[in-house]
Image (cartoon, helix red, strand yellow):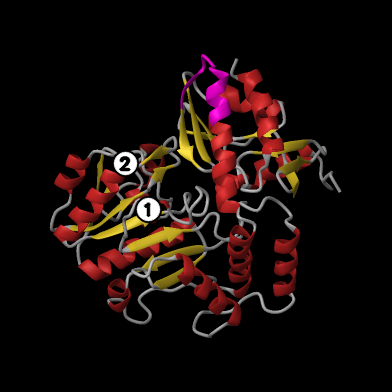
Amino acid sequence: MTTATLTLGEIMRSERDNQIPLYAKRDIALVRGEGAYLYDSDGRRFLDAMSNYGVAVLGHADPEFAAALADQLATLSTGHQSFGNDVRALLLDQIAQIAPAELPRAFLSNSGTEAIEAALKFARAVTGRPNLVAARRGYHGRTFGALAATADPKYRGPFEPLPIPANHVPFNNVDALVAAVDDQTAAVILEPIQGEAGVYPADTTFLQAAREVATAKGALLIADEVQTGFRTGVPFVTLAAGVIPDVMCTAKALANGFPIGLTLTSEAVSAALPPGAHGSTFGGNPLACRAALVTLTALRERDLYAQSVRIGDAIARRVEGLQSPKVRAVRGRGLMIGIELKERVTSTLRALQDRGVLALPAGNLVLRLLPPLIWEETQVDELLAALEEVLR
């Protein structure tokens, strides 16, 4: 079925009249997905270059994924972590295979911002210190603690004062970072690639300096891999840079869009947290764990890490080959790509949508591409055909 039971007008009327108006709505309603494509309420097909902000790494309606979740729904869908569970145990074992030996402990939650919130609570509990050091343009979530780490005033403004003092330093400025960390710093929190800011990779020297100064000052280093995790050709970018944090968070791609969050910690951090210090009613439920288990298995068995690099390199190379006068730079790694424009990105997003391609902004000037990792050359051809028209 390619059409919805409600018309576009009926869908938009209900959402307009009933939702708190927090979202800038596009003028289409997505009702179905299949593979690398999405379909609107009128049956029109769109190439998905956003995967719902980076979560649908296996694409839409993946048969193995759908069958596994249907099976789990018919078996056991919810279960508190005060009880053991077979699916959770299998997932934790698989996570242990991709996590570094220095981060052997896991906390399962329901989203990226929950994973970050846990990390910040753990840092304060372990160090007894009040403050954070984070990066300008960084984005870590919208709950109170995560929002304190987030730099952008448009997110922070309505909710200040925030509960955690944070010093935001220029990204990739080693001297500023080192100067900001002191004996009141509970944690340094960084993204290895700043996604929301415009897909800016961290310099290896910046990440290494963060590790060194955190250790020297007795603070924790938190790696925010919520968006980068599993998308760039490796499970975790921070580890690929040779840096081992004290705490590492991921979420988006972990369960192919099913709500989940993961906070990994060192043994020392785990040992400082007494039973009951943190928890989650829904976190670690069998349905979410099954979704993550299937996703991690598919990433490995279908060789999607290598595919993300191959397809991402092809996109970047071909966009650069357009030699568009509208493009200032192309950045990224794997299938996390930012195309920086010389003009505001809004009209380009609209023009792509009109041509059947859905992409994302990252700030005012950057076109962000976070496609499913199942893309092949066919999808690259479709994307470039549209980009060639809108960027000429």
Q: Position of residue 276 (x, y in %)?
A: 38, 80
* Amino acid type, callout 1: Thr
- Mark before the other along the chain sequence, 2 or 1: 2
- Left or right? Give the position of 47 relative to 109: right
Q: Position of residue 147 (x, y in %)?
A: 37, 50
Residue 322 magenta-highlighted = yes
Residue furthest right in the image: 1
Q: In front here: 354 or 213?
A: 213
Indicate the quadrant where residue 386 lies.
Answer: top right
Q: In front here: 191 or 119?
A: 191
Residue placed under numbered mark 2 in the picture: 203
Q: Bounds of the magenta span?
A: 317-329
Q: Position of residue 382 (x, y in %)?
A: 70, 31
Q: Is residue 109 above or below residue 250?
A: below
Q: In front here: 146 or 382?
A: 382
Residue placed under numbered mark 1 in the picture: 238
* Amino acid type, callout 2: Asp
Q: Quadrant of the C terminus?
A: top right
Q: CA distance from mark 2 to mark 1?
A: 11 Å
Q: Is residue 20 visible?
A: no
Marker disc for residue 372: none
Q: Residues within 10 Å of mark 1 (few under 14, many from 20)?
A: many
| Residue drawn at (38%, 56%) of the image | 239
Residue 104 magenta-highlighted = no
Q: Is residue 248 above or below residue 370?
A: below
